[in-house]
Image (spheres, rainbow, N blue to C red):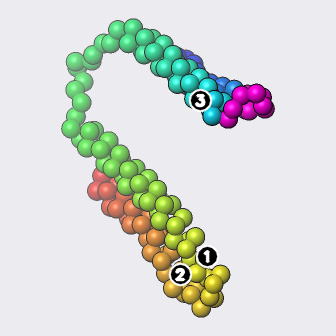
Amino acid sequence: MFIFYTVMLYLATIIFPVFYFYKIKHNRNIPVIKKGKRALLMNIVSFSVVTIVASIFIFSGQAFANPTQPVESGDMALAAAFIAAALVTGLGAIGTGIAVSSAAAAAIGAISENENNFGKAMIFVAMAEGIAIYGLLISFMILGRV
């Protein structure tokens, strides 16, 4: 239940400054820079307060260890494999998004100037898509060894 309340408080630290910014956005007496600074300050203060309160409640309890069941090295290797597969897939997708955004914009510009450049432009966009495919292949290889 504590986790639910903590998540709700963190969501509130994101939502309330946005509403505050839009509320003061319509006030024409305050310059835009001051509005943004006030909203950012409110966001930082509310996030800091929620983090401090959550850390007080998290670290106030007692922790009990279970000495009868040690952690096996196989469990850690399995966890590391899943984390590695997730990182490879996620970072590959992020890299693909960055590459395709610039390559596709350039391709559209080249095609609008000369329609004969379509084939050349699409090759560069497809090469950027290959980054995600390579990330998926590597993650399948990692998960295949588990």
Q: Is residue 83 above or below residue 7?
A: below
- Residue 131, position in %: x, y? 42, 66
Observer-nearest residue: 6 or 137?
Answer: 6
Q: Is residue 26 magenta?
A: yes
Residue holding disc 1? 108
Please rate how many residues cluster around mark 2, counting C-alpha atoms within 10 Å: few if below 14, some from 14 to 19, many from 20: some
- Residue 5, position in %: x, y? 57, 19
Residue holding disc 2? 121
- Give the left or right position of residue 91, taking residue 112 as reference: left
Q: Which mark is residue 37?
A: 3
Q: Is residue 15 above or below residue 144?
A: above
- Residue 38, position in %: x, y? 61, 26
- Give the left or right position of residue 32, taking residue 146 as reference: right
Which contiguous range is marked in magenta?
23-32
Residue 120 seen from this side: yes
Whichever of callouts 2 and 1 sits on the residue coming sooner in the sequence is: 1
Residue type at numbered disc 2: Ala
- Badge 3 element: helix
Q: Is residue 61 above or below residue 103?
A: above
Please rate how many residues cluster around mark 1, counting C-alpha atoms within 10 Å: few if below 14, some from 14 to 19, many from 20: some
Residue at figure coordinates x 51%, y 74% from the top left? 125
Residue at figure coordinates x 52%, y 67% from the top left? 102
Observer-nearest residue: 58 or 77?
Answer: 58
Marks 3 and 2: which is nearer the front?
3
